[in-house]
Amino acid sequence: MRNELEGDILKILVTEEQIKARVAELGEELGRRFQDKNPLFLGVLKGSFVFMADLVRACPVRSDVEFIAVSSYQNATVSSGRVKINHDLQQDITGRNLVIVEDILDSGNTLAFLKDYFLTKGAASITIATLLDKPSRREKAVTADFVGFEVPDEFVVGYGLDYSQRYRNLPYIGVLKPEVYTNSR
Ligand code: IMP
Ligand code: MG
């Protein structure tokens, strides 16, 4: 079958095989850290949904999952750094050991906001697991405890990450061809 997405990809930064191997390692490390601690894996939607699904299956401890959906308020040119909750927690997180699961740590605005928010909701501990880290773009002093891959300052898509809600279903992390941004389709 013809792959409709492949033609839009300029280059692959992280292959499917590399992701698979790294997620297995992260799952083991998280498992050692959270044995007998009943962690709550808390995915930040939408971007984390693919990573979340693979990570929890790679982590052999008793745990449960929860999701929150957020977006940052944006004007035409730049993210304001303010975060809006589009779908809130559906359970009490008081006393829970949270593992926040993110697709990418970029400016840090989202995770800085969420850490504060979950602490006010009574979380006992907060651990951040992010598939990708773009440290060159940080505006807030946030560091992840578990990082899959560090990426350069390029806009990336795939494995949950989107451009304009597309490309989340690519099994690898890639960079789009410039014409994809200029052609409105
Ligand atoms: P923040 O800038 O650290 O708050 O990241 C906010 C959100 O922006 C992330 O959770 C992603 O959904 C999105 N994002 C940041 N960089 C990229 C990228 O390179 N590709 C796709 N989404 C991105
Ligand atoms: Mg996004």
Image: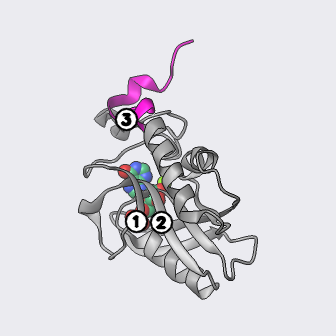
Local secondary structure at mark 2 = strand
Above or below: residue 94 compared with residue 73: below
The answer for how far apart the CA atoms under marks 1 and 2 are is: 5 Å
In reply to whether residue 13 is colored magenta, the answer given is yes
Label total for image: 3
Q: Which residue range is magenta in the image?
A: 1-18
The residue located at (66%, 76%) in the rendering is 96
The colour scheme applied to this rendered structure is one colour
11 with respect to 145 (left or right): left
Under mark 2, the amino acid is Ile
Residue 172 spot, x, y in % from top left:
44, 34
Residue closer to the observer: 182 or 159: 159
Under mark 1, the amino acid is Ala
In reply to whether residue 74 is colored magenta, the answer given is no
Q: Is residue 26 something one can see in this rendering?
A: yes
Local secondary structure at mark 3 = helix
Which numbered tag is attached to residue 144?
1
Which numbered tag is attached to residue 180?
3
The residue located at (70%, 59%) in the rendering is 62
Label located before the other in sequence (1 or 2): 2
Residue bearing the label numbered 2: 128
Q: Are marks 1 and 2 in contact (CB under 8 Å)?
A: yes
The answer for how far apart the CA atoms under marks 2 and 3 are is: 32 Å
